Image (cartoon, coloured by chain):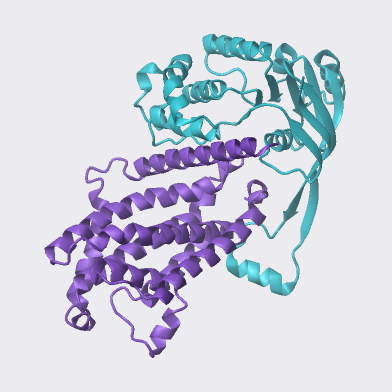
Amino acid sequence: MNLVTIMTDFSAKIKNFAGLSLSLAKAEFKLRNEGSYLGIIWYLLDPLLMFLVLLIIFSGRMGEEIIHYPMYLLLGIVMFNFFQKVTLESTRMIREHRHIIKSIKFPHKVLNSSVVLKTLLSHLFEMIVIAAFLVYYGVGLKGLLLYPLILIPFTVFIFSASIILSSLYVYFVDIENIWAFLSRILWFATPIFYSTEPGTRLYTVGLLNPLFYFLTVARDVVVYGQTPETWLIAGGVGYTLITLLIGTILFKKLDKRLPELI
Amino acid sequence: MKKIILDQVSKKFRIGFTKNQTALARVASTLSGREPQKELWALKDVTLTVDSGTILGILGENGSGKSTLLRVIAGIYQADGGAIKTNGKIISLIGLNIGLQDRLTMKDNIHLCCSMFGLSRKTIRERFDEIVDYAELNEFTNTKLYQFSSGMLQRLAFSMAIHCNPEILLLDEIFEVGDEHFKKKSTETLKKLVGKGATILLVTHELWMIQKYCDKAIWMEEGKIKRHGNTEDVIPNYLQQKPVNAT
């Protein structure tokens, strides 16, 4: 087989993978919004309500010391939501699609990529709200234009986490409950409504949390219009690569046997 | 042309009590060091060659390995031994589990399922009308599938499968679908496909169906091919040894 054939085959596979992911994402998006007259409003209502509640509770306390606290808070909620929605759905993805996995040969990773794509769309809607808030608070949109540079590795990180969690279903059928609990703990352990100072125990523990890097870098760029420190960028990229590596190894190990294991 | 070549293909399953465990149960069984498992050979040294333009019937009792054989050929299950070679695009219709979504319209389902069968978005758009026309469901394009009867669902699944360029069609208990008129139409279509060189593997418990449509047949028992040959030889042999099951 010559190089041209290999490249043509590879590009056809990628095209097929992308087309299938998109079709699945569209179908899931429609299923989720079935019979909903408010439609897309529901996507925005959840983070906005959470934002309002947290703003009311914390703006006068820990929020006082944080510049542009409403922006700081909203961006944290929206980014964590993206991660949480994808990962929670990933824990039940294999169970929900087990019949088709056993009946048709298709690249199983499209299930992960379709969930990521679908949630990415709602994340982009949420970012429009953030843009409106940025204008309202006079922060400006300059930093937001650079957000895609953060969103790309963040999406890869979330996709990798999705692969790991969906694979774990094969080992633990109650992974959905376990992850619902763990992700709640992660919500509190991530500086969403508070900030951490270097030297504190919370800060040191936070360094083990991949979301800390993405949130800090995004806030630096979008809210504060400043260049993030290199080690923070390296942390985000590093965690993405590690997660991707673990996810790929785990999935590769399970993928071929998946239809018979579920 | 040989469409399917299986050489000494085997497939085993580990039937254990450790499948579908919760995290706590998994930890407990790992710590106790006891994970009782039993090996079941669903296929054992299966050697089979199927030429193009053939309809091969597969018969046998429940648990004899018929569906596993289809899944191994389709590449859904990985074989544990032997070699498999297939030439051509495989479409598997194992029941109606092709990803049909009850809460989506027929139009959305066609786009989704044909994507699963490997058709590009452009090709699906081009063939959409043909698929709907063939299934005779023109009035239901925007109807959600939960309102479809089982016959309508079968017609839709069948129409999608044959419009996705199958060169090897794997059918598990799906052959004659819909009402009498559609059964006739679908059978003619399959014969035309076979005439163009496609290969069909049909798993069914309906012996008359194999007798009527299949040139060749295999009888499977305990994961092995017990008989392989012309339909008129295999079925009497099967009936002789399994008279109760064949009624």
Residue shown at 30%/80% (left/top)? A195
Q: Is residue B126 left or right of residue A48?
A: right
Residue A135, placed above or below residue A10: below
Residue A102 image offset from top left, x and y in percent: 61, 41
Residue B174, placed above or below residue B70: above
The tint of chain B in the picture is cyan
Q: Quadrant of residue B201?
A: top right
Residue A18 image offset from top left, x and y in percent: 47, 41
Residue shown at 40%/72% (left/top)? A213
- Given residues B191 and A230, the one toward you in this image is A230
Q: Quadrant of residue A51?
A: bottom left
The tint of chain A in the picture is purple
Q: Is residue A91 left or right of residue B218?
A: left
Q: Does residue A174 appear anywhere in the picture?
A: no
Residue A223 image offset from top left, x and y in percent: 24, 69
Residue shown at 37%/22% (left/top)? B140
- Given residues A104 and B14, the one toward you in this image is A104
- Given residues B104 and B6, the one toward you in this image is B6
